[in-house]
Each structure stands twice: as C-alpha cells, then as structure tokens.
Amino acid sequence: MPTIAEVRSLAMQLPKKSRRRLGNELLDSVMDEPPGAMTGDEILAEALRRDEEIESGKVKALTHKDMMTWMQQRRASR
C-alpha cells in the first residue's frame, strides 16, 4: 500500500482542477453526512449555477449588510 507521502506526491502532479476534485472526493469519504446532504461536487455545481444567475442578471446579489438585515428581520418575525 502506498504511503501518504507517495499519494500526496502523485496528487500534486495533477492539474489544479483534478486536485480540487480529488480533495472533494476524499473529504466526502470521511464526512458523516446526514441523508440527502449535498456532495462537494453538488455544492460546487450549485454555486456555479447561482453565480451564472447573478452574472446573467436573472437575480440580484445582496450585499452582506442587506443579507444580515434580511436574516434579522426574518428571525424577528418568527
């Protein structure tokens, strides 16, 4: 069985995108996720989808301040 150092050395030779995918897969393999939780690839796909909606003008991004105000108002209305 290869050592961690050997695996790391091989992984570092991969292109950045492949290393990112491998990292997500390794992280997913050790996380105790609740049923139905999104995988790293699914989270990335959702983030890219939302970014495209903002870039296309389909939705408007909120500032951090506006988002915090919205969250506080929502919390207060419960």
Image: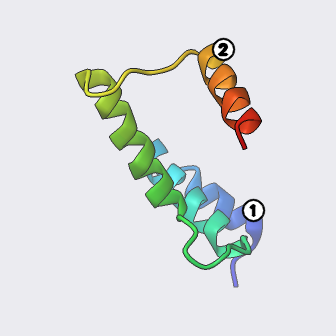
Q: CA distance from mark 1 to mark 2?
A: 44 Å
Residue 10 at x, y = what percent?
57, 60
Q: Residue at position x 45%, y 59% from top?
A: 42
Q: Secondary structure at mark 1?
A: helix
| Most foreground residue, 12 or 63 | 63
| Most foreground residue, 3 or 36 | 36
Looking at the image, residue 68 sits to the left or right of residue 18; the answer is right
Q: What crowding class fits label 2: few (fewer than 14 Cα within 10 Å), some (14-19), or many (20 or more)?
A: few
Q: Residue at position x 74%, y 75% from top?
A: 32
**Count of numbered tags:** 2
Residue 69 at x, y = what percent?
67, 20
Checking the image for residue 77, the label placed there is none
Which quarter of the figure is the N terminus placed in?
bottom right
Residue 4 at x, y = what percent?
75, 67
Q: Which residue is mark 1?
A: 5
Q: Residue type at mark 1?
A: Ala
Checking the image for residue 65, the label placed there is 2
